[in-house]
Image (cartoon, rainbow, N blue to C red):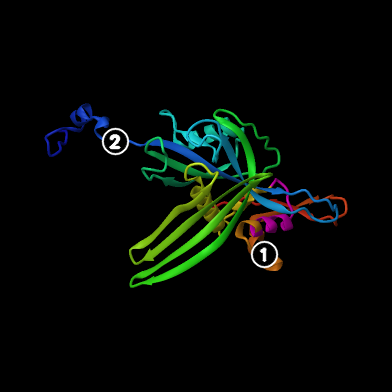
Amino acid sequence: MEETTDINGLTERKFLANYKAGDYERPSMAVDTVIFTVMQTKEANYRKLPEKELKILLIKRGGHPYIGSWALPGGFVDPDETTEQAAIRELKEETGVENIYLEQLYTFSEPHRDPRTWVMSCSYLALADSDGISLRAGDDARQAEWFTVRPYTVGQSIRKLDNGFEKITEYRLELICGDIKLSGIVRHTLLRTDKGVKNTYEITENNGIAFDHARIILYALERLRGKIKYTDIALNLMPEYFTLTDLQRVYEIILGKEQIKAAFRRKYSVLTEPTDKMTSDAGHRPSRLYRRKWLID
């Protein structure tokens, strides 16, 4: 069979033999993982149910750039691995965390997002039940800690266009771990026209968060808020057995608003199944324990 040639008369074999990858500037490829969990706060009154907080895992950088700042776990992709394999490896090397839910989030590719060179980041969203996780900082991470995530909307404007609208929302992101307080302000621009939808996230203020990780965190939070409304993704934050009250509280923490108990249970009961187990907390009436119901498409 005769080989097909291109406009220069080259077959694919000859084209590849003469191809020079160095003719094109190539970015470095990195991964960054946004891992969320929900933790209980300590409650002095044993008759009162402990509060829960949404947490994110950050590492303290041990090298330049941004030495001493806090960043998402991540690093460069090795030549013999996929971005997912790199995310799993870096998460284990830097924090000791492994075997958790992971999905690809977004690729951040702006040329100037890293002061070293053009570095593209393929980011991942991860969810974990914090019970049983023992953090262990390693590799180039000096420290690994869970930070409470507190996002606030500080401003919003909507501009109508002839073929759609532009909505600008400013968020203040606060990350707190004991006496460590990090913050940033991120501007989210949503442009919706008859040509499609475009989302951009721009950091306008940053205090202690390395690189552009403030906007990656906010992007991940928005993804999580969207997906828990129509998928069972939130169950990856739960232990094997849980009460429906605990599950409802997780939804409330992520969405930032209370859920009506009856309506919540009608909507999300399809995601769980009851067990014959009961809670045995001192000072509280026993409650039925549920577990995840695996839905087969």
- The magenta region covers 239-252
Expressed as whole percent of the image width and height from the top left, the position of residue 293 reads 65, 52
- Three-letter code, disc 2: Glu
Is residue 244 on the magenta stretch?
Answer: yes
Secondary structure mostly taken by the magenta-highlighted segment of the chain: helix
C-alpha span from label 2 to label 1: 50 Å
Left or right: where 215 falls relative to 40: left
Asked if labels 1 and 2 touch by Cβ distance under 8 angstroms, the answer is no
- Quarter of the picture containing the N terminus is top left
Q: Which of pointers 2 and 1 indicates the residue nearer the eye?
A: 2
Packing grade of label 1 (10 A; few <14, some 14-19, many >=20) is few
Which residue is tagged 2? Answer: 25
Chain-order first, disc 2 or disc 1: 2
Tell me which residue sits at (70%, 67%) in the image: 262
Expressed as whole percent of the image width and height from the top left, the position of residue 141 reads 57, 32
Q: Quadrant of residue 240?
A: top right
Q: Quadrant of residue 29?
A: top left
What's the mark number on residue 258?
1
Work out whether residue 33 or residue 66 is closer to the camera in this orientation and state it: 66
Tell me which residue sits at (45%, 54%) in the image: 201
Expressed as whole percent of the image width and height from the top left, the position of residue 224 reads 55, 53
SS category of the residue bearing label 1 = loop
Tell me which residue sits at (34%, 70%) in the image: 163
